Amino acid sequence: MKKPDRQAWLGGGSDRCANPPDPPPGQPWRIVLLGAPGVGKGTQAEILCDRLNACHLSTGDILRAAQCRGSETRSPALEAALASMREGALVSDETMMALVSERGRCLRCCGGFVLDGFPRTVAQAEALEKLLEREGVALDAVFNYELPSEEIVERLSGRLVCRECKAVYHETRQPPQVPGICDRCGKPLFKRDDDRPEAIITRLKAYEETNRPLVDWYTRKGLLINVPAHGTPEEIYVRTWTCGRSVPAEAGSAPA
Ligand code: AMP
């Protein structure tokens, strides 16, 4: 199946996908992923999207794409958002909600979606609920990936990413074959600005403060599924569906 190019999501405004997803064979899945930074949400999002033919909607990727585009096109609100991101702090709810609501087309897209990094607060979850209602669609499941915080710090401090194809490596646990070069596309690997130790501490603190109320909120909605996030990406993927056996029957059928 062809990989969606996410142009509408990354660019927003009047941008359209040159390569929109094909409708999946069953119902499209609409999923939210929760979990601390570094828990492996991005990797799971990629696997889920490949298997469900859905689109990976990451709010962090919107900000990183804006950062690469150059400052002349950025609004003051976007500049402030990028400064918060560099420090590892959360961007204001107002800015994040504005960025997501101008992308309503992606939420109602026939391929479905895996939302990664949004919502991060209850205010954002409430805004998302209203936005989905307006678009005439609903969430099927919220997967909450869990790991002890020492392991998260270890993962983040050694993380290397490819900006080109989004592959993720770890300096010692999963190094690339040629140091500093992506195995998949041959482009250079980077450490994210917000994977510096001071930014990691700020990000984990923000996560701890905001995630519990969010988990409670989605539990009350009957959508939350906790998934232990240890093991290989494939093991976690299989566990996602094992833990998610309670996903409503009317949602698309889970792939093998
Ligand atoms: P991520 O790639 O999801 O780890 O996001 C990277 C950074 O983007 C975060 O540390 C925040 O600064 C910002 N960010 C992304 N999504 C949100 C959100 N939903 N609310 C607030 N800040 C966000």
Image: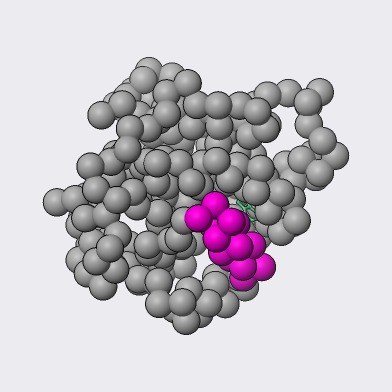
Where is residue 110 shown, x and y percent of the image? 40, 41
Q: At x 23% / y 61%, what residue is drawn?
A: 241
The verdict on residue 3 being magenta is: no
User: Which quadrant of the rendered structure holds the N terminus?
Assistant: top left
218 sits to left or right of 141? right
Front in this rendered view, residue 193 or 81: 81
The answer to whether residue 59 is visible is yes
Q: Quadrant of residue 73?
A: top right
Where is residue 181 shown, x and y percent of the image? 40, 23
230 sits to left or right of 147? left
Above or below for 249 versus 183: below
The verdict on residue 132 being magenta is: yes
**Residue placed furthest toward the right:** 76
**Residue placed furthest toward the top:** 186
Coloring basis for residues: one colour
What segment carries the magenta color?
120-136
Q: At x 45% / y 41%, what residue is drawn?
A: 109
Where is residue 218 shown, x and y percent of the image? 48, 74
Where is residue 121 shown, x and y percent of the image? 62, 66
Above or below for 183 versus 156: above
Identify the main secondary structure in magenta. Answer: helix
57 sits to left or right of 83? left
Q: How many marks?
A: 0
**Residue placed furthest toward the left:** 256
Q: At x 14% / y 51%, what residue is drawn?
A: 256
Q: Quadrant of residue 105?
A: top right
